[in-house]
Amino acid sequence: KNEVEQSPQNLTAQEGEFITINCSYSVGISALHWLQQHPGGGIVSLFMLSSGKKKHGRLIATINIQEKHSSLHITASHPRDSAVYICAVRSGSGGGADGLTFGKGTHLIIQP
Amino acid sequence: DAMVIQNPRYQVTQFGKPVTLSCSQTLNHNVMYWYQQKSSQAPKLLFHYYDKDFNNEADTPDNFQSRRPNTSFCFLDIRSPGLGDAAMYLCATSRHRVSGTRGNTEAFFGQGTRLTVV
């Protein structure tokens, strides 16, 4: 079973700061997801990665398959970025439909 | 436009009274998942449907059942809810092709149903 660890668990920063959230996992994966969950529960998928790097607006996600590690970066952070950011992995080969294994999330607060 | 819709958003049920949560999708994805998320915990997979094939997680209690009458709809049935079943229930979908091809897609989540048991 894959173990997914995120750090930090809680992060408070000032508006404009560069934010990094880390994720490591224990077993080889077919894909890694970064998700955002706001109060009230709904989850939004930010990125799905199997290699390299992806960028969307102020968000950047990277993955190092050999090191079993991924990072989510937020540039020019804003109070509206405040949310729980969750790393989740899909284990096994690329064609599988196995469910995701989630990290416990990083609770991010951006203060004005 | 919402692509994965869960109803209701909030559900209150009595201890032991059967309850059904609903999920529908407009994405025509072939896989639908149900996750349980208790307060301050990570979501946990209960089961998923790959097309019509039901796949139960080994540690999902028998109290939890699911139905998928067609591609668009999937239901979570809790036969006799206990106080410990109070949680957020999340539905998600994705599209997978046959093994050996690059079939994974992103997971699309609904807004969740928050279940309270009284």
Image: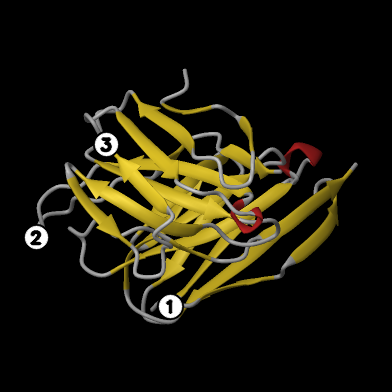
The image quarter in which residue A10 lies: bottom right
The chain holding disc 1 is A
* Nearer-N-terminus badge (3/2): 3
The residue type indicated by label 3 comes to Arg
Query: Residue B100: which disc?
Result: 2
Q: Is residue B78 left or right of residue A7?
A: left
Residue name at image x 62 percent, y 33 percent: B11
Instruction: Give how far apart the Cα atoms at labels 3 and 2 are.
Output: 26 Å
The image quarter in which residue B14 lies: top right
Residue B60 position within the rendered picture, expressed as x and y whole percent measured from the top left: 41, 63
The residue type indicated by label 2 comes to Gly
Residue name at image x 41 percent, y 25 percent: B3
Q: Residue furthest right?
A: A112
Residue A41 position within the rendered picture, expressed as x and y whole percent measured from the top left: 63, 41
Query: Residue B76: which disc?
Result: none
Reading the image, the residue beneath label 1 is A68
Residue A89 position within the rendered picture, expressed as x and y whole percent measured from the top left: 41, 64
Q: How is the image coloured?
A: secondary structure
Instruction: Give how far apart the Cα atoms at labels 2 and 1 are.
Output: 22 Å
Q: Quadrant of the N terminus of chain A?
A: bottom left
